Image: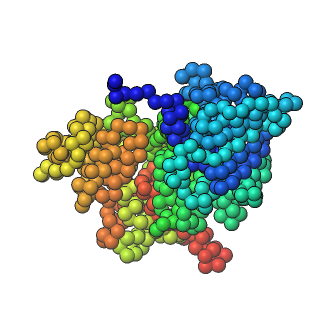
Amino acid sequence: MGSVKQLPDDVASRIAAGEVVERPASILKELIENALDAGAARILVESEGAGRRLLRVADDGCGLGPEDCRAAFGRHATSKIRSLEDLDTLASFGFRGEALFAIAAVSKTTLTSAPRGAKAGHRVAVEGGRVVKEAAAPAPGGTVVEVRELFYNTPARLKFLKSDASEKGALARVVEEAALANPGTRFVLRSEGKEALRFEPAEGPDALRRRAEDVLGADKAAGLLWAEAKNPTLSVRALVSPPDALVGSRALQFVLVNRRPVSNRQVQQALYRAYEPFRHGTRHPAAVVLLETPPELLDVNVHPTKREVRFREESVVFDTVARAVSKALLAAKGIPTLTFSRAPAPAPVPVYSRPAPTESRTAEPAHSLKPEPKAAPQPQRPWFDEGARYLGQIERAYLLFEVDGGLLVVDQHAAQERILFEKYMAELESGKVAVQSLMLPLAVALPASAVTAALGRKERLADAGFAVEAFGKTTLHVTSVPAVFAKAGQVEEAVHRALDGLTAPSAAAADARYDATATIACKAAVKAHDPLSGQEALALLKELRSCRDATACPHGRPSMVSLDRTELARRFKRPGAPPI
């Protein structure tokens, strides 16, 4: 007899159920999504024993006929997919039966349903994956699913469930997420016979804010800032904490993609990138982030529970979310752009995007980071040398200038970081990076796989200003670097970051390349506490004024604070100052 055996159906079913049914909350998520796909306007959830003894979901959706009630418990049963290609354009959360088979394999499940307008319904009872009863039933006005005695036939799984309080919290979180994604739907959660949550329908342009107040609490939601951005493939709407009202927990962060609650690292990183100038310690933003994108640009099948999703254009998602939130935060803080009355109004400020990388060198030039959209040439500003008067330096970190009767304070490190970043980006864009040879090769220790990856992209690295050679299996010799490294005191760290970014092959590496370029600029820039002469300070300000985005360093930290004549007069409660 051979050692390879075919598993019995009931054993295979219970193993498969483990991919979808982790805890009562995972069952609730699937049942609510089925109800929403059925067009439900009202969803009632009841639980007993934190969902272990009973989890009941009733909806007023379109309902199912007798044949569909039976078929819904079949393995791989579906009403939405006919071919593999349908997975690329699936706009629903799932379909009746997608999870019912797995749920019924580890519980005692009853489904009662009837199509709208039907005078009678149908009920199917399943225990451990086997149909034990089927009969006509009163029409429930939609669909009711009751899941009892979860894991009764797999008692070892019960030991891995958390405390009642934790499981109840997870159930409430599922309802909160669904409520935020569907403001027009009524949700009620009853726990142990008592009403725990109720979300009444919200309509109109402020529906999301009203639902956010219900979910987060009026005190947390009242001051949330509105952030919005849109491009041909992505729409972003968000409510986020003001910079000075961060909270001590990530629990108030909700990310929803096409109305589906998800976990996505790109979105979370974009959110924290926007808050980087304002966040300190362990404070976190409260946020409700809603993204809409065509289904074909989204992969929801990364994980069986569909909790994790993957975007085809992850760099676009990162850039769009970060821009939208940053714009809202800067506006709330009153951080101005660099504009002066003697200068022409600046052209719209582009922000460097992080385009999705590709393995094809013809499709992706070596300078894979480039400004988008293309900015019009900036006008010359010969007035700048005489239009600003250098006043001095505070703590050898902040430069003070008088400009047009107002006060301009410049963070010297952040300012030069922006200048060098844009200079290097311009060189990458032109394909002519200024290079500096090192007197002695710099040895960079890496895993053998990383050395191989770097050597496989020697041309791309060379076009970006880095010359590398193999030195053993786990070491690279770097023989030249971009000329902006000339003043860098920590070249090796910056080289590590550059190698990480410029050799990573995946779409997620676009952000790493951006970080690497920003790190190069950071390491090369003048540091805080470095003394600068008046001439050097004015030269730095002149270069900053010519930048496409002079308001912040590449990491998002503000490079300047401005108090113009009017603001100074207001602060000192004067009627105004005469022109100088």
Q: Quadrant of the C terminus?
A: bottom right
116 up-or-down from 500: above or below:
above
Query: x, y percentage for residue 332?
Result: 60, 61
Residue at the image position 63 percent from the left and 51 percent from the top: 52
Instruction: Choose between 166 and 453: the one closer to the eye.
Output: 166
Residue at position x 52%, y 29% in the image? 9
Q: Is residue 61 left or right of residue 397?
A: right
The residue at the point 24 percent across, 61 percent down is: 489
Location of the N terminus by quadrant is top left
Quarter of the image for residue 527 reads bottom left
Whether residue 154 is visible to the viewer of this picture, yes or no, is yes
Residue 522 position in % (x across, y down): 34, 57
Residue 437 visible: no
The answer to which of 41 and 123 lies nearer the viewer is 123
- Residue at point 42% right, 73% down? 391
Locate residue 509, reporting x and y percent.
38, 42
Q: Is residue 298 above or below residue 414?
A: above
The answer to whether residue 43 is left or right of residue 517 is right
Q: Position of residue 78 (x, y in %)?
A: 63, 27
